[in-house]
Amino acid sequence: MNRQINLENITYRIMKESDMDAIVKIDRKITGENRADYYEMKMGQHLDEKHNIVISLVAEHEGKIAGFIMGGVYKGEFGIPDTTAYLDTLGIDPAYQKSGLGYAMMQRFLDNLRTANIQKLNTFVNWNDWALLKFFNKTGFKPANTLNLQLEL
């Protein structure tokens, strides 16, 4: 059952390592899998303030993490300029889905990127993930001028 929440009661902040258990719990609710190793690796990459601009966020409601967005800033990989960021993981606790929290989090994330002089944000979506495609379309994403290439091994 989705909660009726007042988005004005949501607190947004930069993600920190102590958020890991709550993030893994949300992801388990969504995927049915325990991906703690994945999140340990991702948080190690994204929260390394010495080598990265930390842009990953969490949303809190009544002292509980209700959602998260994880991403990073390219540093010249693939010839992409360092004014381009990527979003690789997004999770909204099922109790908060369809409440507008995902869109509100995305707007806060985009505001933070603009403040850091980031000019573009990229992400990947499976072609047939209609719900996620609809979400990204509603938040303003468009197909990029890049091509994802794949070689079956």
Image (cartoon, rainbow, N blue to C red):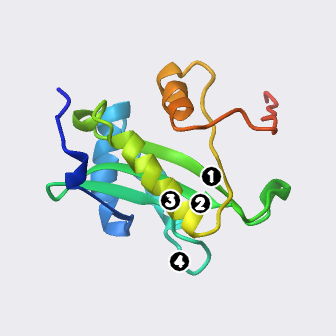
Instruction: Provide the residue designation for mark 2.
Output: 72
Residue 89 placed where, x, y %? 49, 46
Q: Residues within 10 Å of mark 4 (few under 14, many from 20)?
A: few
Q: CA distance from mark 4 to mark 3?
A: 19 Å
Label 3 sits on residue: 111
Q: Amino acid at mark 1?
A: Tyr
Residue positioned 37% across, 68% down in the render: 16
Circle 1 or circle 4, nearest the eye:
1
Which quadrant of the view contains residue 103?
A: top left
Q: The disc labelled 2 sits on which kind of residue?
A: Gly
| Res 100 visible | yes
The residue indicated by pointer 4 is 49
Q: Is 67 left, or right, of 143 in this rendering?
A: left
Q: In the structure shown, which secondary structural element does the residue marked by tag 2 occupy?
A: strand
At label 2, counting other C-alpha atoms closer than 10 Å, the crowd grade (few under 14, some 14-19, many 20 or more) is many
Q: Earlier in the sequence, mark 3 or mark 1?
A: 1
Q: Nearer the viewer, mark 3 or mark 1?
A: 3
Secondary structure under the numbered disc 1 in the rendered image = strand
Q: Residue at x 28, y 40 (%)?
A: 93
Residue 37 appears in view:
no
Query: Disc 3 marks which amino acid?
Result: Asp
Question: Which residue is labeled 1 in the image?
Answer: 86
